[in-house]
Amino acid sequence: MRGRILALFAGRGTLVQPEALELLLSQPDPEGLAGRVLASLPKEKLILSAMDVRAVLGGPAPAGGGAAGAGAPATEPRPAEGPSCAPEAAPRGVRVLKDVTGGSTCEGRIEDFVGYFNDRLARLRRILRGRRELAGAVPVGSLRSRRHEREVRTVGMVSDVRRTQNGRTIAEIEDETGTFRILLPAESPANLMRDEVVGVVGKLSNDGDLLWVQSIVRPDIQISRQPHLAGRPVCAAFISDIHVGSKTFLEDRWRRFVAWLNGREDRHQDYARRIEYLVVSGDVVDGIGVYPDQEEDLLIRDVYRQYQVLAELLKEVPDRVRVLMLPGNHDAVRPAEPQPTFPPEISRLFDSRIAFLGNPCLFSLEGVEVLAYHGMSIADFVSTIPGLSFNTPIEVMKEMLRRRHLAPVYGDKTPLAPESRDWMVLDTVPDIFVTGHVHGAGLENFRGVVLVNASTWQSQTDYQRMMNFNPVPCRVAVVDLASLEWRTVSFDQ
Ligand SMILES: [Fe+2]
Ligand SMILES: [Fe+2]
């Protein structure tokens, strides 16, 4: 029975979490139920959780949980409380769903690159094949033979993109069967990025050498997705880029934030006292040797000492708060993404309330799925897509979701490790997506996903002044996990 159920989901490319399997097996007709659960899932669902099974058994688990949201009266967050209509409480605590830590296989051989790009293509193609606009898509290698057809569809990876003098875009797409040239009209809004995987709909030229593109189809995210919600009105706070060790680390404002968490500042305590998770999206210290002449900007020139000071600062965070921390490009881990988490020499400096994650990492907080990524690749998006800038990180994050990829461009501004699995592919769409890195601050709902660009605790550096970049420091984004309602609390004064 167990094997049959697993095979049923595996056939659709869905992994079954152990809790979900146990729940299925505990019901009177496990196989019948599995069939109903399968029918209820969106096509590209990668992981089946117990929440998904419960949704079929008794309606969405924390239905009505949203009512307990932003305006909820300030009550003590006693564990037993929560929306009374929830048939079963959502899972408590933190669960890591996807993280390269301990799973890096990369040795930088040619075979690694082949496996890496093949994995990216296969997984994104699976999502794209589910799109109506791409029904009947043919392999890239068979395009030439279809020049008499009115319209052709294919899926491939963009291997080269150039602008022609008259503003058109000429590109090359490829898959395992071949490569092909495609031409986009000057007015096309597609903004192809190198190494992204797209669907192409168009018509072949008379000689069968070129595909005139009518539309580019992206994996994108569904508009009508049902977010996971926590079973009690608990909150998560999102911050980033603390940069401890820098002369421009804003220690006084950090201390005010921590005082607020401890109930020592009046405003918005309805949120503060419910915060039980604090997510830190990288660049937790300033590091050493990250950019030329960095020593001049450092207050603490020993990187271990920087982490020690951070560990001391985090001790003031109240005990009820679990801290989750991932590295960024300033941290003492390998620079190539995906970055495994901090090594033991660093993590042992911290107390046991700190959970160390890789970058990027998909994890759940009380059932709510959070994708955290430091955000190095924002630079690649900004340099490729007109209209995007370091001041519009939320718009960049939407482009990542549309492409279902955090860092498509290989070999430009983002160092990427060619792992046998492409960890930057977004098989599942998170409920909350958080980045940092650009030292901005943004919060927005996008198609049912809460997008957070978490703010920094560092004021403008000389380097940023030279680059004409103005940070937006000391904003804390707080999200109510039972309703996904949010607010920003500023400590920048
Ligand atoms: Fe940073
Ligand atoms: Fe950064």
Image (cartoon, rainbow, N blue to C red):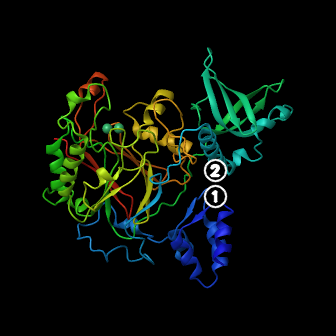
Residue 477 image offset from top left, x and y in percent? 30, 50
Q: Nearer the viewer, residue 204 or 345?
A: 345
In which quadrant is the C terminus drawn?
top left
**Circle 1: residue type:** Lys
Which corner quadrant of the image does residue 171 belong to?
top right
Q: Residue at x 62, y 46 (%)?
A: 119
Which corner quadrant of the figure contains ligand 1?
top left
Picture disc at residue 43: 1
For the residues marked 1 and 2, what is the alpha-carbon distance in whole angstroms? 8 Å
Crowding near the residue tagged with mark 2, few <14, some 14–19, many ≥20 C-alpha atoms within 10 Å: some
Q: Nearer the viewer, residue 74 or 219?
A: 219
Residue 159, image x, y percentages: 63, 31
- The residue at the point 63 percent across, 58 percent down is 43
The residue under label 2 is 127
Where residue 356 is drawn, which disc sits there? none
Tell which circle, 1 or 2, labels the residue nearer the N-terminal end. 1
- At which x and y percent is residue 38? 64, 67
Dot 1 and dot 2 residues touching (CB under 8 Å): yes
**Which residue occupies 67% across, 49% down?**
131
- Please say if 87 is above or below 384: below
